[in-house]
Amino acid sequence: TGYVANNAAQVVFTLPVTATLGDTIYITGNGNVGTAGWRINQNAGQVIFFGSSVTTVGAAGSLTSTNQRDSLHLVAIVSGAATVWNVIGSIGNITVV
C-alpha cells in the first residue's frame, strides 16, 4: 500500500494493528503540498528496524521525516498483533524514536 503525505500540516500514519508476513507500506512526502512531512506511529508491541537503529517498542516508538520529500519502504517481517517491520529502503534523513 502506498501513501503520499500531502497536507500543509504533518501527516501522521499509524501502522496496522495486525499484518501478514510480507505486507508492505510505502510513504513519501509531496513537497508541492506537504511541507510538514510525516510521522509513522506504532501500536502496542510493535517495532521498526531501520538499519542499525530500532524504534522504541510499542506506542511510544515512531519514525519521522525531516524533509518534505523523505520517503520510506517498510515490510512486515513478523506477522500478528506484535508486528515487526523492517525498513528496506528510504530517501532522506529519518528520525527514529
Image (cartoon, helix red, strand yellow):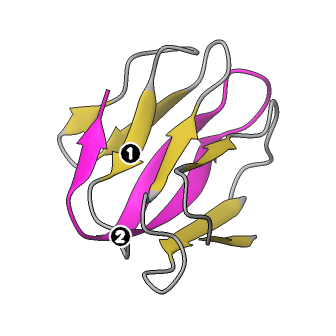
Q: 40 or 44: nearer the eye?
A: 40
Up/down of 74 relative to 62, above or below: below
Q: Identify the secondary structure beneath mark 2.
A: loop
For residue 84, which quarter of the picture? Answer: top right
User: In the image, what residue occupies the spot 55% across and 14% down?
Assistant: 58
**Residue 97 relative to residue 28: left or right:** left
Residue wearing tag 1: 64
Up/down of 78 relative to 72, above or below: above
Q: Amino acid at mark 1?
A: Thr
**Residue 33 relative to residue 88: left or right:** right
Image quadrant holding the N terminus, namely bottom right
Q: Identify the secondary structure beneath mark 1.
A: strand
* Residue 92 on image: x %, y %: 23, 69
Classify mark 1: residues with Cα within 10 Å, few (<14), some (14-19) or many (20+). Answer: some
Q: Earlier in the sequence, mark 2 or mark 1?
A: 1
The residues colored magenta run: 71-97
Q: Amino acid at mark 2?
A: Asp
Main secondary structure type of the part rendered in magenta: strand
The label on residue 70 is: 2
As drawn, the residue found furthest toward the front would be 8
Classify mark 2: residues with Cα within 10 Å, few (<14), some (14-19) or many (20+). Answer: many
User: In the image, what residue occupies the spot 43% across and 68% down?
Assistant: 35
User: In the image, what residue occupies the spot 36% across and 27% down?
Assistant: 55
Up/down of 32 relative to 17, above or below: below
